[in-house]
Amino acid sequence: MGAQLSSLDWVYGASGIIGALLLGAEVLTPSNPISNSWRLFRQMWGHNARLSCNDNVSAGIDNYNELHKSEDAAERNSNYAELVNSYYDLATVFYEWGWGSSFHFAHQLPHESFDESIRRHEYQLAACLGPSPKRVLDVGCGIGGPLRNITRFLPDSDITGITLNPYQVERGNQLCNLQGL
């Protein structure tokens, strides 16, 4: 007679295999699933208190959905700022988790990681600005990923970002402070 495994043994075995695969992906690939997930959980831990929906995510989601129900365009437009803030409050953490601090895409060359393609694209944009522009304005900067990368490329330029969402402003300033900008 062979040994039999209980369902708990299967759970432990599967957990070990999944853990080994995640650790392998963390160490051997640029995807960093453990680091990215840890960053997401850290951000979400204190995220609620900084939302424009005042610490109540469920109410924020309900309010966001309610803003879309009106058939009257004038009524929807009168609540446009609230709609935009509700959306970006709820989406920003997930954007950062999925894309990093730059909320845009770039053509990815065969030898590049996603992050490398984003940096290359942002440095190409900086190069288009000329050798030393005095001032650069990033309109709709989100949490400021491109402006922080362009600052590395153009350290003598005054680079400013503007965005509509207060949470994104706070998060962008937090990331700038972490980088000493």
Image: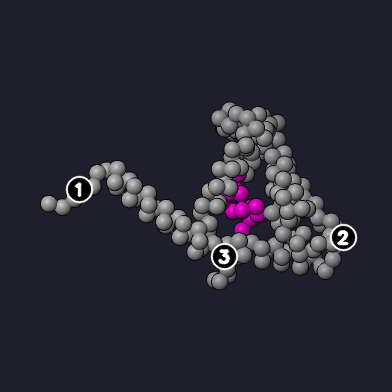
Real-space CA distance between mark 3 and mark 1, rounded to the nearest whole angstrom: 44 Å
Left or right of 4: which side holds 154? right
Considering the numbered disc 3 on the image, is that residue within a helix, a strand or a loop? loop
Residue carrying label 3: 113
Circles 3 and 2: CB atoms closer than 8 Å: no
Real-space CA distance between mark 2 and mark 1, rounded to the nearest whole angstrom: 73 Å
Q: Position of residue 145 (x, y in %)?
A: 69, 54
* Front tag of 3 and 2: 3
Residue 134 badge: 2
Q: Residue at x 55, y 52 (%)?
A: 35
Judge the density around disc 1: few (<14), some (14-19), many (≥20) Cα neighbours within 10 Å: few
Sequence-wise first label, 2 or 1 = 1
Residue 4 badge: 1
Considering the numbered disc 2 on the image, is that residue within a helix, a strand or a loop? loop
Question: Observer-nearest residue: 157 or 163?
Answer: 157
Is 67 covered by the magenta stretch? Answer: no
Real-space CA distance between mark 3 and mark 2, rounded to the nearest whole angstrom: 32 Å
Q: Amino acid at mark 2?
A: Lys
Q: Eyeballing the image, is 61 above or below 40?
A: above
* Front tag of 2 and 1: 1
Considering the numbered disc 1 on the image, is that residue within a helix, a strand or a loop? loop
Q: Within the image, what quadrant is residue 74 found in?
A: top right
Q: Position of residue 95 (x, y in %)?
A: 60, 48
Residue 164 badge: none
Residues in magenta, as a range? 93-106
Circles 2 and 1: CB atoms closer than 8 Å: no
